[in-house]
Amino acid sequence: MPAASGSAAVTEAPPPAPPAPTDPAPHLPSTTVSSQPPPPAGSANEYTIGGIQVRDHRSGSNAPLDIPPNIHRPNTRQLPSTLTSDIAQKVRGVLADCAKDLPKDARGDHPRLEGQVVVSIKDHQLTVTGATMQLRDVTGAALEPTRQCIEQHSVGLQTAASDQDDLDNYSIGVTFAVL
């Protein structure tokens, strides 16, 4: 199969407007993909995931993103890499615990975890408030329970953020090999 070409533009989606009383269509959750027919050639496939509007310009038949993109506007606050590394290593520990019983035959040649954690800082303490994870190159009945274990046990992880002011909803991307 030829590689896809093109690009995908991602922007923060505006908050959904409440449906008008005369609107016959129900308002769908933001993590669903439109069931409309594909757009005509040369146009973009648009959908929302995790509150982020994605306009996918790639050619070919491509699956929609299943992990929200990390968007940090230029010239805005960035967390230090030492802090994001500290929390990422705690997520890696959760992965090791949750995947320890993942059967060898369920793992492909290069199994990995890809995901996003959303963190907040309050009173100099960074806390994971949300997690969206996907296991890649992993199959079988253990895939979904392992993924859920990682997401559930990642939420609530904490690390000290002594030199950081309060912050809400900062996303951090994570990718780890599943050993």
Image: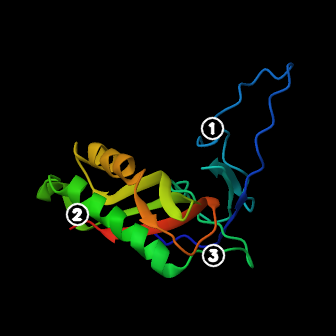
| Mark 3, secondary structure of its residue | loop
Q: Residue at x 13, y 53 (%)?
A: 103
Earlier in the chain: of badge 2 and badge 3, it is: 3
Q: Residue at x 42, y 50 (%)?
A: 155
> In the image, which disc is placed on residue 108?
2
Earlier in the chain: of badge 3 and badge 1, it is: 1
Circle 1: residue type: Ser
Question: Which residue is disc 3 drawn over?
Answer: 78
Q: Quadrant of residue 22?
A: top right
Q: Quadrant of residue 11?
A: bottom right
Residue mark closest to the camera, 2 vs 1: 2
Q: Are marks 2 and 3 in contact (CB under 8 Å)?
A: no
Measured as percent of width and height from the top left, residue 135 is found at 34, 57
Q: Residue at x 71, y 25 (%)?
A: 26
On the rendered image, what quadrant is the C terminus found in? bottom left
Q: Residue at x 27, y 48 (%)?
A: 146
| Mark 1, secondary structure of its residue | loop
Residue mark closest to the camera, 3 vs 1: 3
Measured as percent of width and height from the top left, residue 111 is found at 27, 65
Viewer-proximal residue among 40 and 125 = 125
